[in-house]
Every structure is written in structure tokens, then in C-alpha cells.
Image: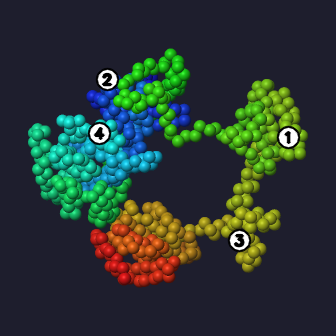
Amino acid sequence: MTRKYQRFGKYLILDHLVDGGMAKICRASYLGEQANKIVAIKMVQPQYSQNPSFVQMFEDELKVTFGLVHPNIAQVYDYGLVDQQLYSAMEYVDGANLKQFLDRLKEKKFVFPVEISTHIISQVCQALHYAHTFTDKLTGKHFNIIHRDISPHNIMLTYEGAVKVIDFGIAKADSNSEATQAGTIKGKLSYLAPEYLDGLDLDHRYDQFAVGITLWEMLCSRKLFTAKNDLAVLKQIQACKIPKPSSINPNVPPELDEIVLKALSKDRNNRYENLDKLNRSLVRFLYSNYPEFNATDLSYFAKQLFKEEIVADRKKFVEFGKIDIKPYLDDMKAEENGGSNSAQVKDIPSADGSFITEEQRSGKIELDLGFSHETTNVDGLNLDFNEKTKPSAKNTGTNRIKRPAANREKTSKVKARRSSTQGASNRTTRARVKAGSPSVKKVSQGKKRAVVQEKKSSSPLGIIIAAGLALVVIFKPAMVQNLTGIPVCSMIGCSDTVAGDNPGKTQNPGKEPASVKGVLYFSFADSDTFNIRTFVNGKRKEIIGAKLEVPMNTPIQIKMMKPGHKTWVMEESITLSEDSSTKNVRVPKFEKKYTGYLTTSQNYPPGSKISYEAEGEKHNLDLPLKEHRMPAGTYEFRIYNDLIQLENRVRFTVEPNKRNELPRN
């Protein structure tokens, strides 16, 4: 039996994700003939949708989130009112929230890896810093957004390794219509900051404290503030005595202890200036201590942790893909046209009367998915639509694509032959002819004889022969040149030698010199070869197994790179020949590469540059530099400015895991 799905405005509800007291969140498909986008629909219960204060809160949330476009924030696409229900359509995040990750790890008696915890919180910092500094591009107004509800519940991790901050539902912004009502706590109790309890005005550092709590809990796999009752939790927050994460999890390095404790300072003036500063500290720590970490590690981690759920969900998506949306589209169109299916939506109170527009009331807000509504005639693809109307001389966007004149005769023959073999007797096809020929004829089923008189060069056999000749010209140009005298090589270019060009050498037609390959067999001292990149004469190549094919009779230079390690360059080049077509290459253990950060004076005149050589590669950078990450070591830096004829050389050591300031002479 075919399952019947619920249509909600222009969305088809697929299944329920979360059922709450005030709203429920469903997975839905956007109903459109051009797109079938999966979204998450937040549907407010009807009784709240008619409450003016709730409508105002809903409006505040949309004002905050609708303009936010950031890779680490779940985007809101659409909002409106359908059947007395407020709703918003947002980006569907295919994954689980951080709380679910923590719970699953506890079940398996595991702890979040330090490097993955650091990476996740780094992404959260980027999202929140963007929100904190968000400015409306149209008005230039700074929103001063504070999320106020950061916790593991509101951080989503996709199975592909993306991090998304969600639910700005109680976010505070200058655009909000009213302040928080006295006596109400907004945000989860265990993630409040001390200044909230002290009654101070909140700023972006409030979110930083919640971010710090979340990182602490990931590292320690337990709640930071927990007690038997709410009052005891509030007293713990006010005391703000935070144990070092390393005292619970010995895998946490001391540098990360310092970062976490600074973000969790009771006095917000002792915290990081903003979340960008916190993010920079996290990134510096991450790649100094875990240089081989890659963002894709989070994807592998998530897929391993939730592999059963992923398999089950993929089966659901296969079923969703089988849904015939045509009946739902027809029903939606009938409703839009005022048919019997049209939803009767009553007016609901609004705080200022301007929030819900007529389009929103009817659920007819256009969802722009980036598809053009223009149609292009595909006559240029030789498709026969039996078109009877003449193309307009105006540029309407639907004019036919003109072919080169040399191809028109062939097109007319193909079209004429089609018209003689298909269609009813009253169906006609325009047949194009070469310039100077008689006027265009209408070829019908009753006029097959005229078509038979066409040249037979367009027959299938002729096409096959022509294609065969073309392949010979492409793959054996030298042979064609020898037989015909036509300078094929000069027209298309060919690498094989033409007979007669070198009378002292006999051409072997069965051997293609350019395709002859030798083979290098590699053995590695390192056991981990997964991330090694190989370059042959400067071009990236893939080693299949332990084998790499290379050209013969050509000097070969091998270079290999591994993240977090020094580049290995083969000391001498290799040249393989017919007598020695294979060679074994031993790759030694890669040396660990330590990095430091180079900062220069910020007062260099425009046009100033700095150059240096590292691991055999030359680098030219614009000045000034600020925390430029580079391999640790001693360098000779060349500072120059061609505009003012300035040049200076400085020998300087970049120390690992430190901020190194280059002195200016």
C-alpha cells in the first residue's frame, strides 16, 4: 500500500525529527518541478501561533537568523504561515548534535579525541564570531547578536564532518523588540555565565563562557556544573571554581588547559577579547601538537560512531526518492489558484501588524533555489519538436542556437529523413537548406520520394566510415600524412616521426614511443603512507600499490610531501631505458616538521615584500606579516621594495611553537 504523506504549504512532510511542546521539527521536501530540496521545517503549534507575544518572539528569531550566511551556521531559507501555524524552513543538517555524540561515546566508554574536540570548538568560534560582528549589508546596521544558548544540544555535527551552530531562538540582538522579562532565565541552566547571575548587561563574552564549558565537557566527558537541584548549580556557577581538564583527562596538554581556563574566567575581562582570538589560540595549539590532523578526520569519526544510524537513514532517503510528487504538486497548484483545496487561514494577531504579509499568510513565499526560469530552445542538439512558428527577431532568451553554415545542409537532410519515417500524415517538419538553394519545403508522410533523392552520404554506413577516418587521423596522423601528403601533423600536432623526415631511421608502425613507460617500485620506512603526495618532475602523480609508471629516456625527479613532516626530495634523478626499465626506490622515514609563527613590523611602505626559501621552494610574500605559519628553522630573509629601490637581508631563526617577531633594521 502506497504511503500517504502530509503536504504543508509548499513542503511535503517526510518524517518527524523532534516533537516539542511549542513546536515540532520535521524533515520535509520542497515541492517544485525544478528542485527537490530536503529541508527541516520548524512548525509552531497553532495555539502559540495565535499568541501575539510568541509571534513577536518568532519574528525576533527570524530577524536575527534570516540574514546569517556562514558555513558553520544552519541557514534559514523561508518562513510564513500555513493553516494557522507559523513555520520556518531551514537547512537540513544530516548528522547528530554534540550531546548525542557525547552520549554515544559514554555508552562505548570513550572520550572525545583532544584534536577533534579542539577542531569542533574552533569551528563554533568562527560561527559565533561571525554572528557577533554581523552587519546588515543593506542598512549598515550592526546587530550585536548574542546567541545565549550555546550548549552541546545546539551544535550539530554532520556525518560528512561539518560543524553547524543552530537555534538562535533566544538570541539577543539590537533588532529585538523587547528586553528579557524579569524573573525568566533564557538559556540552559548549566551553561549560564557568572555575569548573568550578577545582573550585568550581556555581551559576546557571555557566549565565550558557554563555549568554554562545552569544550571542557568534551575533554572530560562529564558535566562541568552539576548538582542535585537548580539552586546548587547556580551557586557552583557563581563560585566558578574550574578544575583543569588534564586533572581528569591526562591526555589534555597543559597548553590546552590554559586556553580552556582563560575562556572560563569568572571575570569576563580576563577572557579572550573575542571568539576570533580564542579560535586563533585553538588553531595554533591544534596544528602545533597535532600537525597531521585533517578536518576530514571528524567525518571518519562520525561515520564510525553512527554507522548503524547512517545505514538506516540512507534506506529512508531511497524511499523518499520514490515518492511521486505530481499529485502533491497538482494539489498545491489547485490551492494557489483558489480551488477547493485552498487552505482557509484566519488572521492572527501580530505585535505591530507588519510581520505576517499576505504571501506569508497563504504560504506562497517563493523559495529561491538558484534555478533560472528561462527556457532555451535545444534545436541545436538536432532534436525535432515539429516547431511551426518562426523565431522572433527580438532577443527573448528563447531564440534558436544558430549552427555554422557548413552544418546546415547536413541538418536539413537529417530532419527531412526523420519526417519521412515518423509522425502522422498531417505532421510537418521544416527542412533547412544551404544558402542559394530553393526555399524551405514542408516534408510530409506523403512526400517520401523527395527525401529518397537526397545524397546517401548521410546514411549510417557513411557516418561509420567518416567516423573511422576521423579516428585514423587522430590516432595515426603520421600515417595519413605519409599516404596523402596532407600536412596533418602541422594542423593537429603529433609526436610520432613522419617517414621521410628522418631517412636514416625506419618507422615502426606497431610501436608508439610516447606511450612507452618504465616502472618505479617504492618501499617506505614509514608505516603510515596514506597522506603522502608524490610529485614527478613537479607534477602530482598517484602511486598504485607500490608501483608508479614513468616515461622512459627522460630524467625523473621525485619529490614527496607528508603533512606535518619535511618534504623528501630524491638526491639524484633517475632515467629509465629499454635496457633498464624498472628500478626500486627506498623512501626513508619522513622527518617531523615543527612550525613557528613569523610576525613583522606593520609599518612597511606599500609594495614591500619578503622572500625566503624553505624545503627547496621559494616563497614571496607581501609585507607586513602577522603570525605567518612556516617550518621552524634558520632562514635568510630578503626584504625588498622595487618601487623605492630598497633591499635588505636578515638572517633569523624561527623557533617552533612560538610567535617570532622579525626585527626591522
Task: Quarter of the image for the C terminus: give it.
Answer: bottom left
Label number found at residue 497: 3
* Mark 2 residue type: Gln
Q: Nearer the viewer, mark 1 or mark 4?
A: 4
Q: Residue at x 48, y 19 (%)?
A: 342
Task: Quarter of the image for the N terminus: give it.
Answer: top left
Element assignment for label 3: loop
Element assignment for label 2: helix
The span from disc 3 to disc 1 (Cα, nearest Å) is: 42 Å
Element assignment for label 4: loop
Q: Earlier in the sequence, mark 1 or mark 4?
A: 4
Q: Residue at x 16, y 53 (%)?
A: 266
The span from disc 4 to disc 2 (Cα, nearest Å) is: 20 Å
Which quarter of the figure has residue 526? bottom left
Label number found at residue 454: 1
**186 sits left or right of 298 in the view:** left
Q: Earlier in the sequence, mark 1 or mark 2?
A: 2
Residue 326 coordinates in the image, percent (x, y): 53, 26
* Mark 4 residue type: Ile
Q: Residue at x 43, y 79 (%)?
A: 639
Q: Residues within 10 Å of mark 3 (few under 14, many from 20)?
A: some
Q: Earlier in the sequence, mark 3 or mark 4?
A: 4
Label number found at residue 47: 2
The span from disc 3 to disc 4 (Cα, nearest Å) is: 75 Å
Asked if 134 appears above or below 560 in the picture, the reply is above
Is residue 662 something one can see in this rendering?
yes
Q: Earlier in the sequence, mark 2 or mark 3?
A: 2
Q: Are marks 3 and 1 in contact (CB under 8 Å)?
A: no
The span from disc 2 to disc 3 (Cα, nearest Å) is: 84 Å
Asked if 526 appears above or below 184 in the picture, the reply is below
